[in-house]
Image: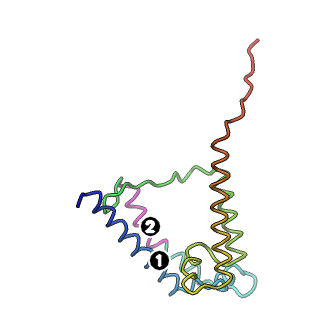
Amino acid sequence: MSISSKRSVATAIFSGVSGLVFGLGLIVSHMIDPQRVADFLDIAGNWNPALAFVMGGAIVVAAPAFAYARRHSLSLIGNPISLPNRFNITPRLVGGAALFGIGWGLSGICPGPAIVLLANPTPQAIIFIAALVVGIWLTDTVLAVRSSTPDEAVPQASGD
């Protein structure tokens, strides 16, 4: 077996185990319950701080991995590491974050818990996943059209 084949197998195993641990964490913390998320967002009413503790725990777990990634160009299994630029705030990033926040606030579901909810599907989870798929398709379609359209020519000021 070649090194790249071994790396592919290791990546698949690590990805599967990571997804399983993430899904189990969502179940154990009850973050697949849209009402739990709604209660976290309801600071003036029936506020439940549980999500803040889950987020804090996620930061504690992720911080060493990000520290490692900032100092190394390869992961522990040899895959290249590419971190996004933390300072490049674009309209697309802001729009995506706003759309995510609005959807999360209205439904109490985000993509990770929605996938876990599909194991025991509810109408709310199915509608969310359908909207997610349509949104991804629509975004890909709009970006493809935008990238295939030549930029408008910008008239240059003459020095006459």
Q: On the picture, is 70 further left or further right than 92?
A: left
Give residue 71's quadrant in the image.
Answer: bottom left
The amino acid pointed to by label 1 is: Phe
Query: Which residue lies at the image location 57% right of the left edge and 78% below the top edge?
Result: 113
Secondary structure mainly formed by the magenta segment: helix
**Disc 2, SS:** helix
Query: Which residue lies at the image location 52% right of the left edge and 51% below the top edge?
Result: 85
Image coordinates for residue 122, horizontal then vertical, percent: 64, 85
Query: Which residue lies at the image location 60% right of the left edge and 84% below the top edge?
Result: 121
Q: Residues within 10 Å of mark 1 (few under 14, many from 20)?
A: some
Q: How many marks?
A: 2
Which mark, residue 22? 1
**Disc 1, SS:** helix
Split into 4 quadrants, where in the image is the N terminus? bottom left
Image coordinates for residue 5, horizontal then vertical, percent: 29, 60
Which mark is in front, 2 or 1?
A: 1
Q: Please, is residue 146 above or below residue 77 in the view?
A: above
The magenta segment: 59-72
Give residue 3's quadrant in the image.
Answer: bottom left
What residue is shown with label 2?
63
Q: On the picture, is 51 further left or further right than 9?
A: right
Foreground pick, 61 / 129:
129
Image coordinates for residue 44, horizontal then vertical, percent: 75, 82
Q: Check if residue 109 falls in the magenta segment.
A: no
Foreground pick, 66 / 25:
25
